[in-house]
Amino acid sequence: MNFVLRHPVEELLAAAPAEPALNHLSVPRNRASWSVLAHKGSEATVVQALAAIEGASVRFCGPEEWLVVTNRDGAGAVASALAAIPGASVVEQGDGRTVFSLAGPDSRALLAKCTALDLHPDAFAIGRSANALVCHVGGNVARVARDTYEITVMRSFAASFFSEICLLGREFGLSAGFAD
Amino acid sequence: MSAYRLTTGGLVDRSAGLAFTFDGRPMRGFAGDTLASALLANNEVLVGRSFKYHRPRGILTAGSAEPNALVTIGTGGRREPNTRATVAELFNGLDAISQNRWPSLKHDIGAVNGLLSPFLGAGFYYKTFMWPAAFWEKVYEPIIRRAAGLGKASMQPDPDRYEKAWAHCDLLVIGAGAAGLMAALTAARSGLRVILADEGFRMGGALLSETAKIGGQAPADFVASVLEELKSFPDVTLMPRTTVFGWYDDNVFGAVEKVQKHVAEPSPDRPVERVWRIIAKRAIMATGAEERPLVFGGNDTPGVMMASAMRTYLNRYAVAAGRKVAVFTNGGSGYATAQAFASNGIEIAAIIDSRAVVPDVAPKGARIIHNGGIVATKGGNRLSGVVVERSGFEEVIECDALAMSGGWSPVVHLACQRGRKPVWSDEHQAFLAPENGDLLTPAGAAAGLSGLGDALKDGQEKALAILRGLGKRPKLRDLPEVEGEYDPAFAPLWYVPGAQQKAFVDFQNDVHVADLGLAKREAYGFVEHAKRYTTGGMATDQGKLGNVNMAGILAGMKGVSPAEIGTTTFRPFYTPVSFGAMAGTSRDKESRPTRYSPLHNWAKKNGATFVEAGLWYRSAWFPRAGEATWRDSVDREVLNVRANAGLCDVSTLGKIEIFGADAAEFLNRVYSNAFLKLPVGRARYGLMLREDGIVFDDGTTSRLAENHYFMTTTTGHAAEVMTHLEHCAQTLWPNLDVRFVSSSDQWAQMALAGPKSRTILQELVEDDLSNEAFPFLSAREVMLKGGLKARLFRISFSGELAYELAVPAGYGEAVADALMEAGAPHGICAYGVEALAVLRIEKGHVTHNELDGRTTPDDVGLGKMVSGTKPDFIGKHLAGRFGLTAADRLQLVGLKPVDVANTIRAGSHILKEGAKPSLTNDQGHVSSACYSPGLQSPIALALIKSGRERHGEKVIVWDGLRNEEFPAVICSPVFIDPENGRLHQ
């Protein structure tokens, strides 16, 4: 049997424009992710091991907890690397978390309407991430480039998040589309 | 009063004419006008009627403290009542109507209230409408509401959008007047992240109303050059049209920005208002000072206006408030206003000064009456003269406008919103901001300073102090010199004696001096009591003008200093904030986020009717052609599950992955039943108690590997259980090696129930599902055909042979489709939560209908799930206390009506036969009820006193809401398959 993967905002994005605007919300379908939990006394070694994994980004979610994000095609290697970390427990979350990538000159101004995080470059440098309320739902915000942020929310909230950020983005002419 | 627009001057754009209407009459103004300045320019002096007596009222101020000029702006869903015309930015097409009058502003029948004023004094509500009590709601309140009150809200939905946003800064400067601009500039030059917020649509505050020269520039030019420099810093944010309304914990400020309140047709791409939460390391309160009205007879006649407001209309808006202006003052402001009129060639009728000796300079040739006071005014809807009294002699002075100035009160509201009271200063004759440490610093006029030069200097100094406090090196620049400023010093005058007419203290609420006297005589002289008794300081202006005079007058009556009277309590909001702004995007359906199951689309394709369950949409039932009611669908689904098979979406259950060497011990402590010896590959039903021994939640937990467990919770308690586990792990037993994370959204979970479920499932699953290979309560990872890994649990809520299959959420819809296809030859159907409920009631399974926060495990028949051998678990110690073990507690039973035509409804109460409904006679209640299509009878679960001993007893089901009662028989709560044969087949 061949089961087809379904993305949680598929129906909402059907009518979206193909051409990205200056400010654009891109929705990658192919993200894989894992929750990584460090057991007592292992935090330092887990942090070290996570930093050494290639082709994945590590998002801070709370004390001794991270979300590791990568693309589905490289997922196997990352999963094995994670499984080999001593003192860590790993839970697959690729289907439970939905990733949105917001890019554009007004991305910070738009996110100021979504989250209480201070996203000034001095306070939230590239590579930083944090769990916070984003557009009315709980999520993780990561700065991946100067004007690019990745927001990860729980799958069941993805449609709500998507509608809200699109509404708030109208001021900046935000467009949205699948990335792949 | 005859107001008019000057041909030159001001900060309005004469090339940009704007058309607007007032009470339907077309008028014109300019860009840069407020509605108030445009009304004055059109010689509209009467703009409203007062709250209680319907007295004619004119524009009193030029700012946010305005008590009189409240109008309704807009039409349809955009109609906004009680808008202060003095801060409403004029736009083309603005429609304004006056309020609180009928049939028209000039001829108002309600003004007869004024004749009744002896009966409408302070406390009249409490004295007049006392009895009969039943009259209050039906008779008195509607009459009072119709007679009093201001504008009326639109009953149509608001077509506009609102938003919320967050901002962060090192320094928030509140107010862009002299002190605020200088503070922001000093901080910005030294590299701080600065936000400068001002309620006005044009930044500059009082500077825009003045004519002194600053650094050789006109004030407006000085403001422009400062703003230009501020804009050059990347970390400076200018926020005009933004009122900082509240100061909250952690130095968070609430502010509301008018984004599109000044356009006729707002763009749907932007909000009309936006609420900001500004998180500031430090803040400077440069909110200026409010000029005090004078309390004299007839001080509310249209044409009487604050002296500083008249200067603002003249200098900023180029509107003269009259052609022959009198001034009544106790300080320099009155003289500055007289100078401003004189320099525009407008006649000064007289300057009446309460002081004997004055340092201020009057315009050349103007008549000054020292030691004078006004005791009455002439004219009804429009001022025509004032009655001046000096040394016992009265004189009528003709004039068409009167400027009054009673001194200044620093605007200290924000500094007093977190518990500290303002402090009286004899030196300033005013209440000053309390000491708040270095988080919020008053500057300029808000700090009690007078004069432009002092304000500029203070703004700079306060910013320098903050820079030093934050460890930054300040960059110093010279202050600009100020030429031609006046001295606003004054001598206090709380009340002008000899009033021949009502002397108003609070204009908006029609509180006059006699009301305060009455309040004091009737023992309501304490300032908080006086406020409630007289209504002084309430409604939209919150006493911004009148409260200080109220304190001064009460002090005078008691013969004490205003320091002993104090002020009423300051609370957010500084000015009114619309409900729309506070709701932001969270309105109507979006008032909370919606959660969608990964099987939502599968359910939709199968025709589901959805029901809201918390944030979730769950499929309730799946109607088919020919089914007239929901019951038809549910009955069919139930019968089909019992006869064939059904598929139900249970993805909404909470799911938690638990890891660690001590995970078993952890579970053993959070559940009341034993978990230490659960083998790998097995699931177990678990019951969690609260510390007090009452059931908290139930669910299953499966051991997937030696140190890996998978817990499910009820949909409703998913978040609470997670929080509970966090509390246990972090606070109660930090020594245990256990970690967990929610995976609720990772899995699409479906219940496949019915005698044919194994046959159907086997078509998708590679692994052997025979009873021997996968017996009841098995739980392990399986492989689906096509190579998809899944988790399979043989658990049952329906009492049938049943499985729960969990697949990665993205594949949920495809797998559910495949199951439906594989099951079609076997008669599979989709079933919803309603059928699920019937199935579980028939089987006697409990949900939160029974686990309602009052029941113990024993109450709901799960007493055997409380381990007697475990050394400890949550709830153990309090579960045995007196009362929780009493023999007459409510116990779970089944219930069947004697006559199957009687529908049992949840919530009905149980009575003994022949007993009258009463608390004493109450035997318990129905917790869950349904129609069982298999038994062809209504059935129910009920909690009944000593219920387990009473099987077979006939009782009465009493529904007090519908006034129904009928007999029913108590029975076992398990209606089908009590031997559990089907579970193990």
Image (cartoon, coloured by chain):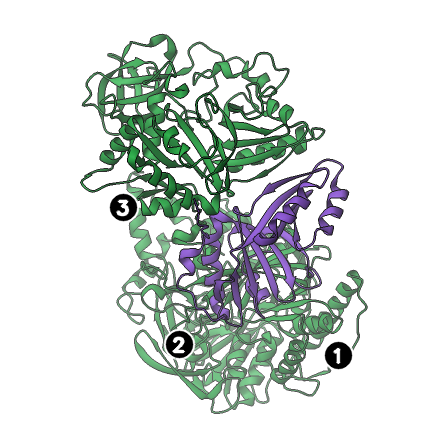
Chain colours: A purple, B green
The residue indicated by pointer 1 is B479
At label 2, counting other C-alpha atoms closer than 10 Å, the crowd grade (few under 14, some 14-19, many 20 or more) is: many
Instruction: Return the mark for residue B139.
Output: 3
Q: Earlier in the sequence, mark 2 or mark 3?
A: 2
Element class at badge 2: loop
Q: Chain of mark 2?
A: B
Q: Earlier in the sequence, mark 2 or mark 1?
A: 2
Q: Which residue does the image show at 35% across and 30% down from the upper left?
A: B837
Quadrant of the snapshot with the C terminus of chain B: top left
Q: Chain of mark 3?
A: B
Closest to the camera, between mark 2 and mark 1, is: 1
Q: CA distance from mark 3 to mark 1?
A: 65 Å
Q: CA distance from mark 2 to mark 3?
A: 36 Å
Which one is nearer the viewer's eye here, B596 or B645?
B645
The residue indicated by pointer 2 is B45
Q: Position of residue B5 (x, y in %)?
A: 45, 86
Query: What amino acid type is highlighted by mark number 3?
Result: Val
Q: Is residue B424 above or below residue B10?
A: above
At label 3, counting other C-alpha atoms closer than 10 Å, the crowd grade (few under 14, some 14-19, many 20 or more) is: few
Residue contact between numbered discs 2 and 1, judged by CB atoms under 8 Å: no
Which one is nearer the viewer's eye here, B984 or B216?
B984
Which one is nearer the viewer's eye here, A104 or B305?
A104
User: Are both tags, 2 and 3, on one chain?
Assistant: yes
